[in-house]
Image (cartoon, coloured by chain):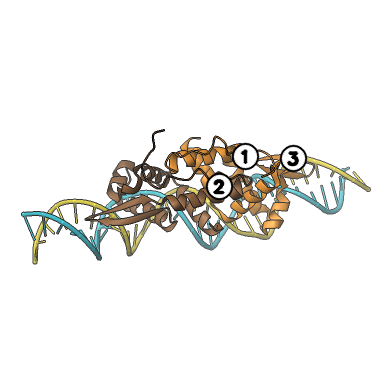
Chain colours: A orange, B brown, C yellow, D cyan
Amino acid sequence: MEADRVIRALSALAQEHRLAAFRLLVQAGEQGVAAGVLAEKLNVPPSSMSFHLGQLANAGLVTQRRESRSIIYSADYAAMNGLMGYLTENCCGGMSCSEDAACLPSPQRKSA
Amino acid sequence: MEADRVIRALSALAQEHRLAAFRLLVQAGEQGVAAGVLAEKLNVPPSSMSFHLGQLANAGLVTQRRESRSIIYSADYAAMNGLMGYLTENCCGGMSCSEDAACLPSPQRKSA
DNA sequence: TCCATATTTCGATATTTATCGAATTGTTGG
DNA sequence: CCAACAATTCGATAAATATCGAAATATGGA
């Protein structure tokens, strides 16, 4: 992941509502969450929520799909892994934990 | 690490010059780097560099100490670990790699 | 003490970001 | 086709952030 992308990802997460939204999306897994549901849960007006989701999407941290009337957002685990990888490599003294510990690509929380 | 602190840390890193500065500080290790050296390396005027270093310090990501005329900044590995831990726990599906892989607390880059 | 060095603080300005109501676009069911 | 629902785009405004020269503060040496 190149520096420019990393900065966009960090900027995207560096905001109260967006961090909260992304956390919810991570919890929700592949299934995702509709924009309106996020707005309601976070107590943010729809237009504002849309703005924030746009930022997350622009940073590549979430994907969106239409499902009937709703637009469902999902966390992009690969992008998050990319970010974590960059931080680990460049901002953590080069210690890497990416080999055996990656962001789960789906909500299948394993036994542990 | 609580959400408010996390957001300040993310905001601090979400900026070209600050991310670059922090990377240099991580590379430099405990020894640290003087403010002026950072300014020169990053090609940023001293007052601007000072502003950015202030942001990093406010976020708790760097510490500073005076050494003669210079002020030396160092990366705070513990803070970075805290951030990584939060992201891993809350934004990565709960997968944790913090047990055996932490940010190195000093520049002692090991054999590998 | 006086001067040069290293950095920060101040102040003014430009840019970016956040907020949110109103209007618009797309979708479904009747 | 029309009414309702879901979400986004638009537009205007408020707030936070970035930039950087000039002035101020601290340090060390002559």
Q: Is residue B49 left or right of residue A71?
A: left
Could you tell me which secondary element the residue under label 3 belongs to?
A: strand
Number of the front mark, 1 or 2:
1
Measuring from the top left, give residue D10's x and y in whole percent: 63, 48
Q: CA distance from mark 1 to mark 2?
A: 15 Å
Q: Which residue is mark 2?
A: A12
**Quarter holding residue A66:** top right
Same subunit under labels 2 and 3? yes
**Residue found at x 28% / y 46%:** B37
Number of the front mark, 1 or 3:
1
**Quarter holding residue D23:** bottom left
Determine if residue B32 is in view: no
Is A20 drawn above or below residue A81 in the view shown?
below
Amino acid type, mark 1: Tyr
Could you tell me which secondary element the residue under label 1 belongs to?
A: helix
First along the sequence among labels 2 and 3: 2
